[in-house]
Image (tube, rainbow, N blue to C red):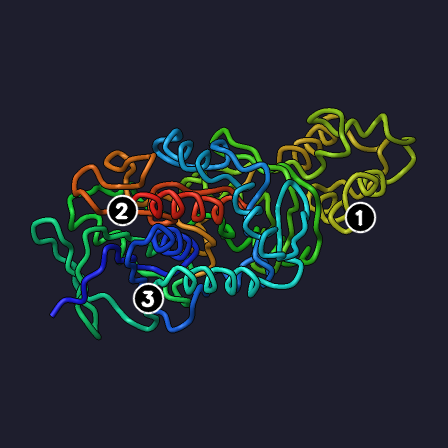
Amino acid sequence: MDLKYDVVIVGAGAAGSICASEAGGRGRRVRLIDHSKKFGEKIRISGGGRCNFTNIHCGPENFISSNPHFCKSALTQFASKHFTDILDTAEIPYHEKHSGQLFCDNSSRDILNLLLQKITENKVELSLGESVTKIEKTNDRYRIYTDIACYSCTSLVIATGGLSIPKIGATKFGHEIALQFGHSLVSTKPGLVPLTFDTALLKHCADLSGIAVEAIVSCEGYSFSGGLLFTHRGLSGPSVLQVSSYWQSNKPVTINLAPLRSDSQKLNLHNLSKSNKLVKNILGQLIPQRLATSICAQMNLDKKLGEATETLIGSLDERVCAWTICPTGTEGYRTAEVTVGGVDTANLSSKTMESSIHQGLYFIGEVIDVTGHLGGHNFQWAWSSGWVAGQNA
């Protein structure tokens, strides 16, 4: 026999959990199912264990989607302030790091415990370690088969996330369900992920491992400023992760290694010091000395400024302020923080997250073709889309 519910939600991450709580708070009988035995594992590990749970500057401009307007309604209905109000009421301490990023003072466990508390208070029935094997629709009800039971409901919410970080349980299940019920997918790729490089550039980065600079990284017409870190695996840091979501295969990436020290895109070394000083030492006034020494050695500029030709100095300007490189790929979903692409928003209501093809079917969170920038925006999309579906499912 089916166990009957008003709402069944598949996926107990950020989006699914807040959706379940809100639907339960409306008096709906709710079942929340997740194949993982651990509740909210992606929340737990995020932000170095302190969960960058939102961004106070979160807006539509912080998202990638084939329909850039789709996210507006949900973000308006449930903004970052609405989520911080919930934390304030629960007396959960948090702080702003930079650029509006909010983190828990203690740990991500505070967020997890709050979600579990809300779920319990609103009488949501939670099933962990239970895998959905099949979903069918008969008349106006959905039937959800798992390896343990069979449930039926009038409202089915898919909150299974994307493909990123498969070691904690990410699968393509949500995308498969979308296709089963006639929805199309926007092609997916790893986002917020380190880029990979050829052997020569990899060796250069490895030799400079540990050096960090403030940089502007650009590709495909998009630019992001922030930290850049040389590692033994290549280049990392917020600016690189941000641009990875926009990067396309075989396309170049341009890096300005000295954006905060120059009034323009040129170093203007002749204006910085006298000609009898070594170029690498003058450059070392603008970027870390070890990086300056390495660049000058590569360019045969281990000499005094007065001995360097205008052409060489011009080339150095380009190398530092417009360093153009071609990544060979990314590290993939294994280390990606998010999935770019997903369920096409064309057949979803931006106000409710409900399918326009099948009444009572909802998609929320990362499974949808809405991807946030680094810095708490993806969590805010989870809270906003989940909250909106919870008011309507």
- The quadrant of the picture occupied by the N terminus is bottom left
Instruction: Using the image, tell me which numbered label, if any, was put on residue 125.
Output: 3
Tag in front: 2 or 3: 3
Residue placed farthest to the left in the image?
139
Q: Is residue 274 above or below residue 151?
A: above
Earlier residue among tags 1 and 2? 1
User: Pointer 2: what residue?
Assistant: 362
Instruction: Using the image, tell me which numbered label, if any, was put on residue 345.
Output: none
SS at circle 3: strand
Name the foreground residue: 266 vs 4.
4
Q: Position of residue 345 (x, y in %)?
A: 29, 37
Q: Is residue 206 above or below residue 269?
A: below
Identity, as a three-letter code, of the amino acid under mark 2: Tyr
Name the foreground residue: 176 vs 18.
18
User: Pointer 1: what residue?
Assistant: 289
Identity, as a three-letter code, of the amino acid under mark 3: Glu
